[in-house]
Image (tube, rainbow, N blue to C red):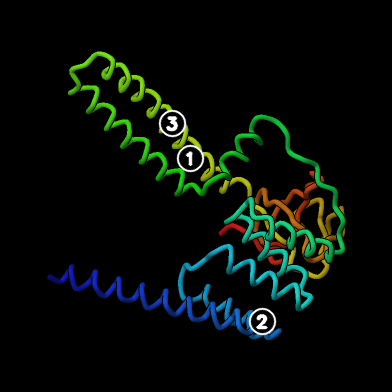
Amino acid sequence: MKNIVYVIILVSNLIFAQNEANQLFDEANDLYKKEKYTEAVDKYESILTIGKYESSELYFNLGNCYYKLGKVAPSIYNYEKALLLKPEDRDIKTNLIFAQKTAIDDISIVPNVGFSNFIYKISLWFHYDVWAWITVGFSMLFLISFVFYYFSGRTIIKRTFFLGMFVFLGCMVVALTFAFLQKRFERTIRPAIVFEEVTNLKSEAKNSSKSLKVLHEGTKVYVKETLDNWKRVELTDKTEGWIKKDAIIELKK
């Protein structure tokens, strides 16, 4: 009985929180339409504080607000967050390009090539949770094929489902592999946005080391290593160096 009551309370709280998030989202949209961008930002940000109600639409709208307010780093950061959730969304990509044009640094992008990059792009088709559910779906199809194969009396049907078992097993292994790889990529590929107005990329993790490059807010970097108050990062042109930890905010938490 106690477990039932606990479940009811939990579900009720989730429904209440979801309704609150939806209400705040609608209120923030109304403020945006009225060009009250600062107030809209407060509403959108409050949604993130009441629970895990992340969505590409939420980050996209936040990016739009910050772009209208002329805040370079927050606009790029939120567009990038939205793009992580919807990698193929054209509106997000377009607005991100406009936001990036407001950044001071114009660092060239050296494209990643090779088989590993090809696999990485395929893994981005779905979130690793979705890949996991796809794995479950193929495992169920494998089980169904096995049942039909085992109990069928006709040879052609047995052969068909026997072949289907191997097809679904192969698909299951592939989906599981992509789920594992994307989780691994998430740990190793750590994009971040520079939030400091001006900061230095250092050759070593200390203030007295040589400055390799001056970076400005909105620049995208990739975190490779953390050492005390410093992070070793790689720029899109493959330049590597050390930057103060507080100067950047990582896109993936």
- Position of 174 relative to 30 (above/below): above
Q: Amino acid at mark 1?
A: Phe
Say if 152 sits above or below 221 in the image.
above
| Badge 3 amino acid | Cys
Residue 90, compared with residue 42, is above or below; it is above
In the image, which disc is placed on residue 171?
A: 3
The residue that mark 1 highlights is 180
The secondary structure type at the circle numbered 1 is helix
Seen from the viewer's position, the closer of residues 230 and 121 is: 121
Vertically, is 87 above or below 166?
below
Frontmost residue, 115 versus 94: 94
Give the amino acid at mark 2. Lys
Query: In the rendered image, which quarter is residue 80 located in?
Result: bottom right
Q: Nearer the viewer, mark 1 or mark 2?
A: 2
Q: Residue at x 65, y 72 (%)?
A: 62
Looking at the image, do the residues carrying marks 3 and 2 touch, with CB atoms under 8 Å apart?
Answer: no
**Disc 1 packing (10 Å; few <14; some 14–19; many ≥20):** some
- Answer with mark 3 or mark 2, whichever residue precedes in sequence: 2
Q: Nearer the viewer, residue 235 or 173?
A: 173
Give the residue at x 36% y 72%.
14
Choose top left, top right, bottom left or bottom right for residue 86: bottom right
Q: Earlier in the sequence, mark 1 or mark 2?
A: 2
Instruction: Identify the residue position indicated by label 2 in the image.
Output: 33
